Image (cartoon, grey):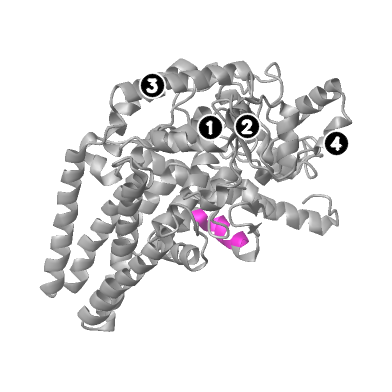
């Protein structure tokens, strides 16, 4: 046996891996292999933050669903050993996990170490961050005997946000707990009753069924891309482009904004597909397709989107970690944003400041108007990413930043200079053309937020399986098949979160298999019509707005009484 084989055959204990992470090594478990991926982090095309959320965890499902078989084979170069038996996850350092050095661990007997592991197993990111403020906050991973499912009282398709608001009259019943912590506990209890237990046996069963379904999906050829379907998509894109050019050169300047908005809306779906390697399944080809469409035709960065989106897929709807729900001061999809949380993605405190106190209380009224201008924010985020040099500077993606920067120049040349400045006859036409071409893409931003804004933001702990977390935090939209082109696969977000590389034209067939899986493992599958889904989102925003009003009233009452213990 050569030295490399001996190295890969080494069996690591939990103690050894903890001390390795304490020393700064990025250890991830994949298929019982111990990978030290620290050297790859700066070159990872999907960004380093996505990888950091997997440190100390069994990331088998997350890694295998996002990467091609060729990439998975290349990962073996980072193998430093293996584990035996079932792995119990650590809380990653980026989420607040604490790790002891070898010297500290040597002071503990085996019994003391096992006892400390058992107690730390209950720690979650949310409980750790609010422990000081919430002395009676209940950890998510209590014994299953404590958990009461009450499934008879919960309908299969119940509301994703049916936890009632807490009123001022409810505060007196729990003097130790603040208004916000009481709400957190209420939502935690609701999710623990609605979803399967996070005990090892239950979650292992869910994971095995999930992996069995992956095998069936592959056997049915649902990962095979239908290029005929993309041919039809290209005809649709070409039609919109032709209508745009015809209207523009016919002097129908304001009207020409409509087909341009339509092509931007539709092209985004192909960027999403290619960004997940769902078209050719080849990294370089699909990434080039995504970057070309996004930057050269739309003025956006596919690499920024991938950096952001990969994190979103791994920590979906986590208020402290998921950038796709971090919109303070404009929106707050959970009361936890009223606590000025720290975001690990943007690496700053999301201040619940004076602006947020005003905007959050009216967010259910401003949601749709703000969606009209959401594309402008994507320009800002794309430019910040590219000009800030946040992408990989070496490795297979070293050239992506430069390719997209050229794309930005091309876009603003043809759109900003060629169309808006040179072709439009006057400033009034320019204003309305720009406004309409951007505002009519707003259905896309509604579709994106629809899948998650109304779903759970609760942390059920480090032992929850990948499959259960995705289904708990994501909803699907029920629509007739002939409308699939309008939603572009985003109506199957729960399916997509489970199997992100499945081409969108196969998601409808995959949905039937996932519904059977959900029935088998007793996980509720959130499915709403487009209008009902919008009602769920507005209802959630209105509920958090009411919580903000109650929180403000409590602060005024406490300040008036001179009692500063309530925060």
State the residue position of label 3.
215
On residue 104, the disc is: 4
State the residue position of label 2.
460
Residue at horizontal 23%, vertical 35%?
481
Secondary structure of the residue carrying numbered label 2: loop
Nearer to us in this view, 440 or 58: 58
Q: Which residues are magenta?
A: 356-363
Q: For residue 490, what is the image quadrant?
A: top left
Q: Where residue 102 sits in the image (x, y, percent)?
A: 81, 36
State the residue position of label 1.
469
Secondary structure of the residue carrying numbered label 4: helix
Quadrant where the N terminus lies?
top right
Q: Where residue 149 sits in the image (x, y, percent)?
A: 60, 19
Task: State if disc 1 and disc 4 touch (CB < 8 Å).
Answer: no
Secondary structure of the residue carrying numbered label 1: helix
Nearer to us in this view, 479 or 418: 418
Distance from label 2 to label 4 (Cα)?
29 Å
Residue 540 against residue 267 in the figure, above or below: above
Task: Judge the density around disc 4: few (<14), some (14-19), many (≥20) Cα neighbours within 10 Å.
Answer: few
Q: Choose the circle earlier in sequence order: 2 or 3.
A: 3
Q: Nearer the viewer, mark 4 or mark 1?
A: 4
């Amino acid at each position: 046996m050569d030295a490399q084989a001996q190295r890969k055959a080494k069996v690591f204990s939990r103690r050894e891996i903890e001390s390795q992470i304490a020393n700064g090594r990025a250890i991830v478990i994949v298929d019982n292999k111990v990978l030290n991926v620290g050297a790859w982090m700066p070159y990872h095309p999907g960004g380093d933050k996505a990888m950091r959320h997997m440190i100390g965890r069994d990331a088998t499902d997350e890694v295998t669903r996002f990467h091609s078989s060729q990439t998975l084979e290349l990962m073996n170069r980072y193998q430093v050993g293996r584990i035996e038996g079932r792995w119990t996850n650590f809380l990653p350092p980026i989420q607040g996990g604490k790790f002891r050095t070898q010297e500290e661990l040597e002071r503990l007997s085996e019994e003391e170490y096992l006892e400390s592991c058992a107690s730390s197993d209950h720690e979650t990111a949310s409980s750790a961050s609010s422990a000081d403020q919430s002395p009676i906050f209940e950890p998510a991973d209590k014994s299953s005997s404590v958990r009461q499912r009450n499934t008879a009282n919960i309908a299969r398709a119940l509301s994703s946000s049916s936890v009632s608001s807490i009123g001022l009259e409810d505060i007196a019943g729990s003097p130790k707990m603040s208004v916000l912590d009481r709400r957190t506990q209420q939502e935690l209890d609701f999710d623990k009753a609605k979803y399967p237990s996070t005990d090892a046996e239950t979650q292992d069963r869910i994971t095995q069924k999930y992996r069995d379904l992956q095998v069936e999906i592959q056997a049915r050829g649902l990962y095979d891309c239908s290029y005929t379907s993309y041919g039809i998509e290209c005809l649709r894109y070409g039609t919109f482009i032709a209508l745009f050019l015809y209207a523009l050169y016919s002097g129908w300047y304001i009207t020409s904004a409509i087909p341009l908005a339509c092509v931007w809306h539709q092209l985004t779906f192909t960027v999403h597909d290619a960004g997940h390697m769902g078209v050719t399944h080849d990294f370089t080809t699909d990434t080039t397709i995504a970057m070309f469409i996004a930057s050269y035709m739309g003025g956006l960065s596919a690499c920024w989107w991938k950096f952001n989106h990969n994190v979103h897929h791994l920590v979906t709807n986590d208020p402290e970690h998921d950038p796709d729900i971090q919109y303070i001061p404009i929106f707050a999809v959970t009361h936890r944003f009223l606590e000025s949380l720290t975001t690990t993605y943007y690496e700053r405190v999301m201040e619940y400041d004076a602006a947020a106190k005003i905007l959050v209380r009216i967010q259910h009224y401003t949601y749709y108007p703000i969606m009209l201008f959401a594309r402008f924010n994507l320009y800002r985020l794309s430019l910040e990413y590219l000009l800030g040099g946040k992408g990989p500077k070496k490795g297979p993606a070293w050239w992506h930043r430069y390719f997209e920067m050229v794309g930005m120049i091309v876009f603003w040349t043809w759109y900003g200079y060629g169309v808006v400045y040179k072709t439009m006859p006057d400033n009034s036409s320019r204003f309305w053309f720009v406004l309409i071409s951007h505002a009519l893409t707003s259905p896309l931003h509604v579709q994106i937020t629809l899948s998650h804004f109304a779903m759970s933001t609760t942390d059920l702990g480090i032992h929850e399986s990948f499959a259960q977390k995705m289904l708990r935090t994501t909803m699907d939209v029920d629509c007739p098949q002939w409308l699939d082109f309008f939603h572009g696969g985003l109506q199957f977000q729960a399916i997509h979160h489970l199997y992100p590389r499945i081409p969108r034209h196969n998601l409808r067939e995959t949905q039937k298999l996932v519904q059977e899986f959900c029935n088998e493992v007793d996980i509720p599958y959130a499915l709403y019509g487009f209008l009902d889904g919008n009602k769920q989102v507005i209802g959630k925003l209105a509920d958090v707005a009411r919580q903000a009003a109650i929180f403000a009233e409590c602060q005024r009452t406490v300040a008036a009484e001179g009692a500063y213990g309530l925060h």
